[in-house]
Image (cartoon, coloured by chain):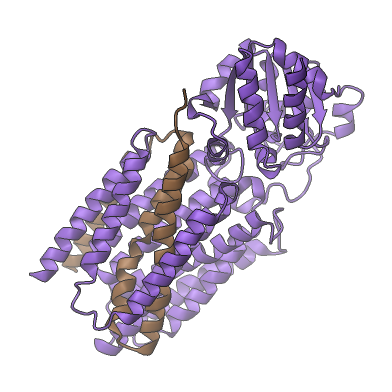
Chain colours: A brown, B purple
């Protein structure tokens, strides 16, 4: 129960923080912001790694493997494509 | 001791994510912000591998290698014109992974510790629900953007009832899991129901509303990660997930606001499914539409001091961005001042036009937001509308409720001295209504493919 209260506190505060951080994004950056944020949501990879490595049951290992694969695509693809897009947003003379 | 170390490193990751997102919100710091986010992720992954519950690394390495391979290939090989599809797909994968992690955690707990507690079951239900909706909703969005599924809204009969039934079924299944946490059956049925729900939620949404949907699915992928954080009691997942959830939600509301519609309206109204007869196109256009040839327009452009280009989805479809860049460079070398007017929902995802023009090497200084550029149209000699329609339709100004774009903020191109519209035909835009701008006294229609016309204009200009 105590854990839940702490977790809820963190959750609510992080949501407010998210709103504060993102309010003024120029439309220029809407796509990279979205793909960069999406890469961060791939943090679920952390949970997937434990599920795949703990090898408790065959089912949980398979689920973990698929989750690791999907989350890694999300993370690697997301950060990389964001970087590629941002490289193009340059100011020219 | 080790747990404390892991959690401290997670805290560093969370801080890097926060700084990274803040960096992504400003052009100067965006590259650094993205790198900070990636660093935070790398730290989190490395320290997680120290977890003592991990007994074997073969499966992990296989998954990481396969995922990295596909991720790198997607990120480097996919052309930037296909960015909306790619972003949709990546959103979906994140959401899908979150619900699978919740499922795996449930299966493990059932074997090792017996029936899980209420927090666990509620959180895993939420994760299964949101994650599966995200995955399958994103797959449909991907299909629509790739042209595999009809871009027009597909309206099933009784879909509201069906959605309500699926929503209630999800609630019921979650309740079943909470009441009887000894079996994972309810969870997996919930995942199935949520998958159908995700499909049905996106199928009735039309192409022009895609920016809202993609931003919303982005938000969901974050919330699914946060829910999985509650399942695993992992603060990093909770923090990162809710940051992304909030960021996606802000984009979603920005996009809906740019169309003057509520989120519910975007999701459930099925705008664009039926062509509404607000005004008969014959009445609007009859005898008033003036068409021009490229060399006439080239003369206009070379005499202009200030030209504003309004790109729309049609420019993306015709892949005209490079031809437009060449035209822009030529005009600038002749001393014409050029800017681009970007409507927030032009294209198929938030910021679509910016990415496209940046790809063609057009400086972002020239890309102006709607609010910034609208006051400059009266001083603009020529506006070149390339493949945009509804976002320049003056009918949005009269608040007649029968008109699907009534009240939508538009680019005031009709205030400029001359408007040239490059378009294949007079066919209506996504909203399915005629555009009086095309029949305006100061408007010239240049009928043809956007790319071809930009090329023709450039060569006509070279000859003058």
Q: Is A82 rendered above or below residue A1?
A: above
Residue drawn at (51%, 65%) of the image? B135
Q: Quadrant of residue B334?
A: top right
Of B234 and B123, the residue lying toward us = B234
Q: Is residue B99 visible?
A: no
Expressed as whole percent of the image width and height from the top left, the position of residue B297 reads 78, 19
Q: How many marks?
A: 0
Q: Is residue B261 visible?
A: yes
For this view, does B430 lie left or right of residue B171?
Answer: right
Of B398 and A35, the residue lying toward us = A35
Expressed as whole percent of the image width and height from the top left, the position of residue B248 reads 43, 48
Of A27 and B422, the residue lying toward us = B422
For this view, does B413 lie left or right of residue B295?
Answer: left
Of B265 and A29, the residue lying toward us = A29
Residue drawn at (88%, 22%) of the image? B288
For this view, does B88 lie left or right of residue A65?
Answer: right
* Residue at the extreme left: B1
Q: Is A19 rendered above or below residue B68?
A: above
Location of the C terminus of chain B by quadrant is top right
Expressed as whole percent of the image width and height from the top left, the position of residue B96 reads 46, 68
Q: Quadrant of residue A3?
A: bottom left
Residue drawn at (37%, 89%) of the image? A58
Location of the N terminus of chain B by quadrant is bottom left
Residue drawn at (76%, 41%) of the image? B432
């Amino acid at each position: 129960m105590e854990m839940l209260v702490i977790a809820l506190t963190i959750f609510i505060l992080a949501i407010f923080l998210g709103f504060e951080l993102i309010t003024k994004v120029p439309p220029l950056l809407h796509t990279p912001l979205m793909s960069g944020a999406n890469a961060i949501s791939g943090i679920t990879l952390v949970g997937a790694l434990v599920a795949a490595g703990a090898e408790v049951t065959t089912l949980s290992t398979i689920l973990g493997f698929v989750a690791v694969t999907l989350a890694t695509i999300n993370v690697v693809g997301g950060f990389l494509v964001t970087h590629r897009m941002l490289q193009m947003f340059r100011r020219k003379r | 001791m080790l747990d404390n170390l892991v959690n401290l490193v997670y805290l560093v990751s969370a801080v890097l994510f926060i700084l990274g997102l803040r960096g992504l919100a400003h052009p100067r710091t965006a590259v650094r912000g993205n790198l900070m986010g990636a660093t935070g992720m790398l730290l989190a992954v490395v320290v997680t591998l120290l977890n003592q519950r991990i007994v074997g690394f073969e499966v992990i390495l296989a998954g990481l290698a396969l995922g990295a391979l596909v991720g790198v290939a997607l990120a480097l090989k996919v052309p930037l014109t296909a960015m909306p599809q790619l972003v949709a797909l990546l959103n979906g994968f994140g959401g899908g992974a979150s619900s699978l992690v919740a499922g795996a955690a449930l299966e493990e707990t059932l074997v090792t510790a017996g029936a899980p507690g209420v927090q666990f079951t509620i959180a895993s239900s939420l994760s299964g629900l949101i994650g599966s909706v995200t995955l399958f909703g994103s797959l449909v969005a991907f299909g629509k953007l790739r042209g595999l599924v009809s871009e027009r809204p597909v309206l099933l009969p009784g879909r509201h009832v069906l959605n309500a039934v699926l929503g209630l079924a999800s609630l019921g299944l979650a309740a079943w899991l909470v009441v009887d946490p000894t079996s994972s059956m309810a969870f997996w049925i919930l995942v199935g129901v949520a998958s159908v729900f995700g499909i049905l939620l996106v199928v009735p949404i039309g192409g022009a509303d895609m920016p809202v949907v993609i931003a919303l699915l982005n938000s969901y992928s974050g919330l699914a990660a946060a829910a999985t954080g509650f399942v695993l009691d992992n603060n990093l997942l909770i923090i990162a997930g809710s940051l992304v959830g909030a960021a996606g939600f802000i984009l979603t509301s920005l996009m809906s606001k740019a169309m003057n519609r509520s989120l519910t309206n975007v999701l459930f109204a099925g705008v664009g499914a039926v062509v509404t007869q607000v005004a008969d196109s014959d009445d609007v256009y009859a005898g008033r539409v003036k068409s021009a040839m490229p060399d006439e327009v080239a003369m206009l452009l070379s005499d202009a001091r200030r030209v504003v280009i309004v790109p729309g989805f049609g420019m993306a479809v015709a892949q005209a961005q490079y031809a437009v860049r060449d035209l822009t460079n030529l005009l600038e070398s002749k001393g014409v001042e050029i800017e681009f007017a970007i409507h927030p929902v032009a294209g198929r995802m938030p910021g679509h036009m910016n990415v496209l023009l940046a790809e063609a090497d057009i400086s972002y200084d020239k890309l102006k937001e709607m609010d910034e550029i609208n006051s400059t149209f009266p001083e603009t000699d020529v506006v070149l509308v390339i493949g945009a329609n509804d976002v320049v339709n003056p009918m949005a100004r009269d608040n007649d409720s029968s008109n699907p774009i009534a009240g939508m903020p538009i680019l005031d191109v009709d205030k400029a001295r001359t408007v040239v519209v490059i378009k294949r035909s007079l066919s209506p835009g996504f909203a399915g209504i005629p555009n009086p701008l095309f029949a305006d006294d100061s408007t010239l229609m240049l009928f043809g493919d956007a790319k071809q016309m930009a090329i023709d204009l450039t060569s006509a200009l070279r000859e003058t």
